[in-house]
Image: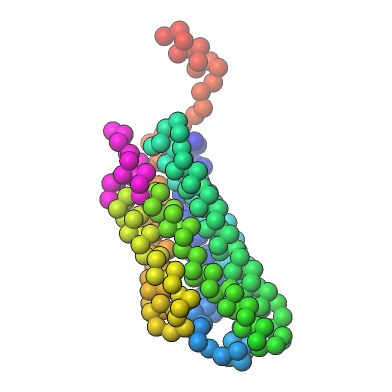
């Protein structure tokens, strides 16, 4: 794989964190809107922040797309560890695609709620719930990615593994950090609510630092020089030897 392509793919992790969280800030979603708020309060929030929400959603939409090349490069590293049969690689790719959708879907619902902020407060509140719940509760794809990646790192028995062994255990810890958000349906306040310390803030910090950490490790794993594909002349030289 061309070295420059790897640099771009690895750097998408940094870009994703900046664009996604930038979109959240622009939309006025940091700190998150409380799930215990009444319908009128929710509707007023959309009416007062309409343009910020709309622009923030556009940023978040493009940010979600940046996870694709980032995940693809990690999948390529996993494939090198697995060899001929690559179930972990395909599982990681499927989870990466699911994670992309898990961001796209709530972003589209947030956008729909901001498209007609003058609609009835009850409908706006329903759309708000439909957006926030999957946006914060979408941990399973990332949990799958982290577990698969962690397992692949620990399975790497090559003389020069791509990633240090501690990164495998780190990925398991990352997956664990997303678990509290999976039970937010039972809470409208407290640490497990969608704006709580465990469901949102812990997951947000773990999520952002995970992308940054793995991007740094992928850049460190780059080959020292540009790899070039073998040509027909190369094959003839090898055959002659």
Q: Who is closer to the viewer here, 3 or 79?
A: 79
Task: Residue at 61%, 83% (x, y): give it.
Answer: 125
Q: Residue at x 49, y 70 (%)?
A: 136
What x and y, as percent, mark residue 64? 56, 60
Q: Is residue 211 visible?
A: no
The one nearer the camera, 2 or 99, is: 99
Q: Is residue 234 above or below residue 82?
A: above
Q: In this orientation, which residue lies closer to the viewer: 213 or 71?
A: 71
Residue at point 50%, 60% (across, down):
16
Q: How many marks?
A: 0
- What x and y, as percent, mark residue 160? 30, 36
Q: Where is 65 relative to 155, above or below?
A: below
**Residue 32 showing in the rendered view:** yes
Instruction: Check the image and name the residue furthest to the top.
Output: 240
Query: Residue 154 colored magenta?
Result: yes
Q: Residue furthest front?
A: 186
Q: Is residue 171 on the magenta stretch?
A: no
Indicate how the structure is coloured in the image.
rainbow
Residue 84 image point, x, y percent: 45, 31
Quadrant containing the C terminus in the rendered view: top left
Question: Measured from the top left, where is residue 223 in percent x and y?
Answer: 40, 37
- Is 238 left, or right, of 170 in this rendering? right
Q: Residue at x 46, y 37 (%)?
A: 86
The magenta region covers 150-166
């Amino acid at each position: 794989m061309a070295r420059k392509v790897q640099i771009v793919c690895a750097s998408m992790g940094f870009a994703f964190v900046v664009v996604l969280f930038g979109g959240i800030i622009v939309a006025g979603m940091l700190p998150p809107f409380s799930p215990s708020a009444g319908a009128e309060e929710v509707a007023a929030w959309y009416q007062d922040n309409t343009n910020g929400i709309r622009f923030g959603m556009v940023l978040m939409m493009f940010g979600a797309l940046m996870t694709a090349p980032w995940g693809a490069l990690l999948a390529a590293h996993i494939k090198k560890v697995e060899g001929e049969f690559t179930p972990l690689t395909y599982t990681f790719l499927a989870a990466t695609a699911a994670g992309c959708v898990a961001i796209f879907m709530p972003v589209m619902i947030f956008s729909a709620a901001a498209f007609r902020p003058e609609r009835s407060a009850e409908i706006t509140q329903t759309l708000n719930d439909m957006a926030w719940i999957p946006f914060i509760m979408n941990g399973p794809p990332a949990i799958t990615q982290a577990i698969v990646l962690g397992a692949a790192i620990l399975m790497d028995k090559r003389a020069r593994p791509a990633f240090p062994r501690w990164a495998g255990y780190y990925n398991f810890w990352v997956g664990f950090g997303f678990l509290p958000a999976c039970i937010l349906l039972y809470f409208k306040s407290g640490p497990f609510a969608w704006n709580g310390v465990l469901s949102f803030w812990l997951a947000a910090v773990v999520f952002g630092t995970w992308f940054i950490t793995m991007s740094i490790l992928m850049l460190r794993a780059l080959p020292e020089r540009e790899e070039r594909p073998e040509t027909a002349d190369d094959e003839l030289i090898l055959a002659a030897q």
